[in-house]
Amino acid sequence: MFFNTICVIGLGYIGLPTAAMFASKEKKVIGFDINQHVVDTVNSGKTHIMEPKLELMVKKGVDKGLLRATKSIEPADVFLIAVPTPLLTINSKLSIPEPDLTYIKSAANSVAKVLKKDNLVILESTCPVGVTEKMSLWMSETRPDLTFPHSHGENSDIRISYCPERVLPGNLMVELAENDRIIGGVTNKCSQRSIELYKEFVKGEFFITNPRTAEMCKLTENSSRDVQIAFANELSIICDKLDIDVWELISLANRHPRVDILKPGPGVGGHCIAVDPWFIVSSATKDSKLIKTARSVNNSKPSWVLKKLKLKIADFFNEYPEKKPKDLIIACYGLTFKADIDDLRESPSLEIASKVTKLNPGQTFVVEPNILDLPNSLKDLELIKFETAIKRADINLILVDHTSFKKQKVWGKYTIDTRGITHS
């Protein structure tokens, strides 16, 4: 059976590129999003996401009439769900944030209303273990006239799979096609149908497993990175206390043939690494001690950076006693959660920059070459160009290692470098 029409639910950092990729393979794609601005932007052939090659692909799809966005879910042969899975507020008893499944459940129920026999539903959203099976149950409650794989196995009317994406912002369109795919079908037929779909553009290998393993695989990949980063971040704190250059130390340690220590930073951001470990912790709280500790280490790093800044401010005024606090100019370099992208989600740099304004009675500038406007949380700050900041700032706080920042060779005495730019 051919897939003539594909409906992508959620036109964010995964949904829109996926929709554009299918459209590039001459498939009719309907993109659903609740945000009118996103819908209008896509329908005009433009994108709300900064990603190489994406806008060109979206424009081609729209111009050919193969890709369109809408605020209503329409019948299709395949439904790909790529909606957010944010964290709820801290659970007072467990002291951990819990995943919010509202968007997935809402998407599943909306899709269920337009389902027809032989449809394929794929969940790509990162989720706790067991959600794919729950999604099958939710849809069956909305559509008792159809059969679903959780109850009818291979003989079900509807096929359901969990197929996580693992792409790197900034190289997303390449990795979307070339990376291997984990296929977690509720049944084998569900997996095979999913592979048929992704073969339209995926060049990587396909690995079939069950939904729970596929869900846990995505969480494990990002939690592993979080633990590795926590080691580097903790190492940077220890080295600072022992008067050791952490950048030199890591460089030397990594000359061991079986050691590969990551670079420390101001914390951990992004929609995956900063969030996904909590999905494991919330499901197995007593047994995920290391994963929970890593989250605590990484979450505490912004506070440590701010303490370093306070010490640097004190040193500055000791050297320049004639200066008044209101005269102090601090420049924060970088707001995104990683280098050379425009993604601010869960970025520790946002938290740090926001708090710098509260401890600095003078001016605080922000340099972020990849965005045009500051988020609402930083509206009190001024977004300026790098050349202006490097000339005017008394204290430089490097938070992101953007390529453009690395071109600056001299940063000055009062510089806090959380990313090792000045040590390269």
Image (spheres, grey):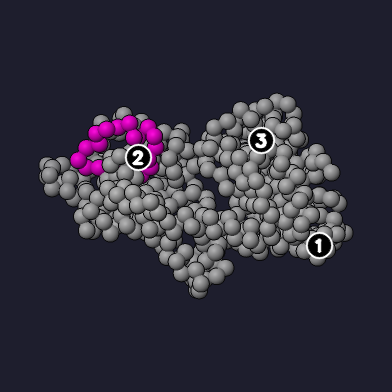
Give coordinates of residue 394: x percent, y percent: 23, 39
Comparing marks 2 and 3, which lies closer to the viewer? 3
Q: Quadrant of residue 379?
A: top left
**Label 1 belongs to which residue?**
153
Give coordinates of residue 87: x percent, y percent: 54, 59
Q: Provide the secondary structure element on which disc 1 rests.
A: helix
Magenta-tinted stretch: 398-415
**Label 3 belongs to which residue?**
20
User: Considering only vertical position in the picture, is 288 above or below 325?
Assistant: below
Q: Quadrant of the C terminus?
A: top left
Q: Amino acid at mark 2?
A: Tyr
Looking at the image, which is closer to me, 30 or 293?
293
**Label 2 belongs to which residue?**
333
Q: Amino acid at mark 1?
A: Gly
Q: Provide the secondary structure element on which disc 3 rests.
A: helix
Q: CA distance from mark 2 to mark 3?
A: 33 Å
9 part of magenta stretch: no
Q: Provide the secondary structure element on which disc 2 rests.
A: strand
